[in-house]
Image: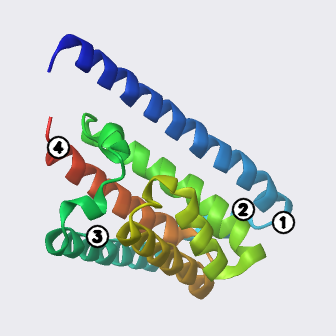
Amino acid sequence: MSDINCDQRSQQERLILISFYFTQLLFILLSVPYLWWKNRLYVELTPFAELYMWLMGVGVGGFIVAMEFVLIRLLPEHHFDDGGINQLLFARRPWWHIMLIAVMAAIGEELLFRGLVQGWIGVWGTALLFALVHTRYLKKWVLVVFVTGVGTVFGLMVEWTGHLAPAVIAHAVVDFVMGCYLRYEAKE
């Protein structure tokens, strides 16, 4: 890769990362005051100390990852092309940074979608909005269907348990494993 291409890629990676952190911080800043005001912040976050929340979150996250790997193996690669955004976000990051990104996305998106929005428009509406916010996927029907399904599963977990913890954990598992997959399967 020439120096110009390398510099352009580094600049793109930096912009994607800044955009990611800005968006997640915005999600948290929108959600936390609302949940605090509704006296739900403590209730939503305390179950992280309970083992069954972790078992459910890791189990569901692992199942989602397994389903994604099955789809990756069965369908042509072009069905999963998001325009290279995920590649730019994860491909050259160390594992600990991938973990940080996964946890930040899980907390920010679950606070906003399942903590704030789901109470207003329900599980199905929130799942559709969750898919729409992942705009880079909208031209790929497989990604839209998959992300809508994942959003539905996360929403049902919150409805069933009454807490965000298992959805946050499952979301972090999915993002971390898939981020590591992109990192270590990356084609430079």
User: CA–CA distance between discs 1 and 2?
Assistant: 8 Å
Q: Which residue is mark 3?
A: 65
Residue 173 figure quarter: bottom left
Name the N-terminal-most of marks 1 and 3: 1
Q: Amino acid at mark 3?
A: Val
Q: Residue 91's x, y, as percent?
A: 25, 39
Camera-nearest residue between 186 and 62:
186
Figure quadrant of the N terminus: top left
Q: Amino acid at mark 4?
A: Ala
SS class, disc 3: helix
Q: Residue 129's x, y, as percent?
A: 62, 67
Give the number of the disc on residue 186.
4
Name the N-terminal-most of marks 4 and 1: 1
SS class, disc 1: loop
Identified at 58% across, 83% down, the residue is 161
User: CA–CA distance between discs 3 and 4?
Assistant: 18 Å
Give the number of the disc on residue 155.
none
Figure quadrant of the C terminus: top left
SS class, disc 2: helix
Q: Crowding near pointer 3: few (<14 within 10 Å), some, many (20+)?
A: some
Q: Nearer the viewer, mark 2 or mark 3?
A: 3
Camera-nearest residue between 8 and 186:
8
Q: Which residue is mark 1?
A: 38
From the viewer's perspective, tell me whether residue 37 is left or right of residue 12.
right
Give the number of the disc on residue 41.
2
Identified at 76% across, 61% down, the residue is 35
Q: Amino acid at mark 1?
A: Lys
